[in-house]
Structure formats: C-alpha cells, structure tokens
Image (tube, rainbow, N blue to C red):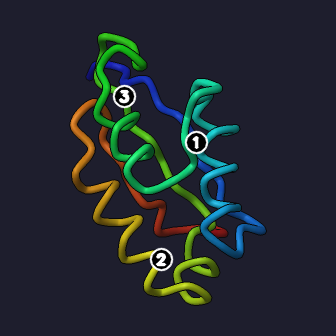
C-alpha cells in the first residue's frame, strides 16, 4: 500500500463561514492571497500547483457541530469539497468528529 499525503482540517470550535475559511487557511496552509470565500476555496482545492504531485487527502474532523449549526453553509462546503480536483476530501466519521 502506498502512503498518501494527508492534511487534517479540524473544525472544532468553528461556528460560521468566516471561521471555516480561517481554519482552512490555517490547517491547509493556503496562500496569503486566499480570498476566504466559496469560490476561492474551490479554486485552491482544484489548483494542482498548490499541492504535492502525489495525491493528497484532506481529512475533515469535528465537522458535525458546524454542519448542525449552519446546515446551508455546510451544504455549500460539501459541494465545494466534492468538486475539488487537486485533492480528495474525506469526512472523519468516528471519534470526536
């Protein structure tokens, strides 16, 4: 089995879109020019120049409280995650997620 590079996106304490965007910037090491909006997130998750050549998996944990508090925003977030072409986004289902 080949090791796949992974990045952890921990949404613990995130309560709104601004917090989600800030956490994406911090946890994923996004560039300073990241626009902190849905289109910008879609762009960086689909930009192969920002990620290693090997496949990258972004593991999202502690997402349920945000999803429950902001279901409309979470629906958009999952659409953006699903459309990512430079990384694979996976939701952690066990533990404290």
- Label drawn at residue 73: 2
The x, y position of residue 56, in whole percent, is: 36, 28
Kind of element beneath mark 2? helix
Q: Residue at x 64, y 81 (%)?
A: 65
Q: Quadrant of the N terminus?
A: top left
Sequence-earlier tag: 3 or 1:
1
Residue 73 in the image: x percent, y percent?
A: 47, 77
Identify the residue under disc 3: 56
Q: Compared to 45, does 73 lie above or below?
A: below
* Depicted 39 relative to depicted 95: above or below: above
What is the secondary structure assignment of the residue under circle 1?
Answer: strand
Q: Are marks 3 and 2 in contact (CB under 8 Å)?
A: no
Q: Compared with residue 27, is residue 59 higher up or lower down, i.e. above or below?
A: below
For the point 56% across and 89% down, which residue is it?
68
- The residue where tag 1 is placed is 8
Quadrant containing the C terminus in the rendered view: bottom right
Give the residue furthest to the right: 13
User: Disc 3 or disc 2, which is closer to the eye?
Assistant: 2
Q: Residue at x 56, y 85 (%)?
A: 70
Instruction: Report which quarter residue 19 is drawn in.
Output: bottom right
Whole-angstrom CA distance, mark 1 to mark 2, is: 20 Å
Q: CA distance from mark 3 to mark 2?
A: 24 Å
Query: CB atoms at circles 1 and 2 under 8 Å apart?
Result: no
Which marked residue is nearer to the observer: mark 1 or mark 2? 2
Q: Residues within 10 Å of mark 3 (few under 14, many from 20)?
A: some
**Above/below status of 22 relative to 63:** above
Q: CA distance from mark 3 to mark 1?
A: 11 Å
Circle 2 residues within 10 Å: few <14, some 14–19, many ≥20: some
Reading the chain from its start, which is encountered first: label 1 or label 2?
1
Q: Is residue 5 left or right of residue 10?
A: left
Quarter residue 62 falls in: bottom right
Assign a secondary structure to mark 3: loop
């Amino acid at each position: 089995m080949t090791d796949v590079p992974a990045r952890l996106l921990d949404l613990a304490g995130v309560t709104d879109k601004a917090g989600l965007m800030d956490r994406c910037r911090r946890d994923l090491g996004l560039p300073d020019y990241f626009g902190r909006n849905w289109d910008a997130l879609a762009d960086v998750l689909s930009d192969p120049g920002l990620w290693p050549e090997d496949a990258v998996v972004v593991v999202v944990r502690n997402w349920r409280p945000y999803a429950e508090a902001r279901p409309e925003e979470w629906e958009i977030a999952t659409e953006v995650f699903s459309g990512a072409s430079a990384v694979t986004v996976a939701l952690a289902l066990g533990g404290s997620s």
